[in-house]
Amino acid sequence: GLAGGDQGFVRPVESMLEADLKRARSEALASGAPVVAVAAADGSAWWLAPAAQPDRAIAGSRRAFGHGGLAPMKGAHLVVKGSGETDAGDRILATFDTLGCRDENDAGIELRGRDGARLGSWTLAAGRTRLSR
């Protein structure tokens, strides 16, 4: 399992989030429709979705702690602050319009271990796809 002080997973999660934000931009351009990056209300997963249906993950975009590449991180979760929210209570990390431009909202993202200890934190600045520590 994931130890509360284990920093070894912070960089891979950061890389996955950034890659998914770049994919969201590409998906918006390719589909000609706005795309959102969404984090589950409980922080256990994130995915990309059409902005009109934020609960419907784009094929292959769902990442869940404890599964796939995040299997060693069972029990970890994201805490997202300062972003929008879906009707279901999930958090919108970023929105990309049909031209692939990102919204002007800042989001704070924390990675927490199973025990709730903060392992890492980032800011997703307005208009950006790169996270800053």
Image (cartoon, rainbow, N blue to C red):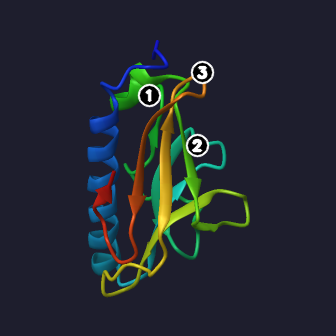
**Label pair 2/3, CB-CB below 8 angstroms:** no
**Dot 2 surroundings within 10 Å: few (below 14), some, or many (20 or more)?**
many
**Dot 1 surroundings within 10 Å: few (below 14), some, or many (20 or more)?**
few
Between residues 89 and 35, which one lies in front from this camera angle?
89
Residue at image x 60%, y 49%? 40
Residue 114 placement (x, y as % from top left): 57, 23
Q: Which residue is mark 3?
A: 115
Disc with the residue nearer the chain's start (3 vs 1): 1
Q: Quadrant of residue 59?
A: bottom left
Residue at image x 37%, y 78%? 102
Residue 67 has which mark?
1
Residue 89 placement (x, y as % from top left): 71, 58
Apparent side of residue 81 relative to residue 100 in the rendered image (left or right): right
Q: In the displayed structure, would residue 122 be above or below residue 82?
A: above
Disc with the residue nearer the chain's start (2 vs 3): 2
**Mark whose residue sits in front, 3 or 1:** 3
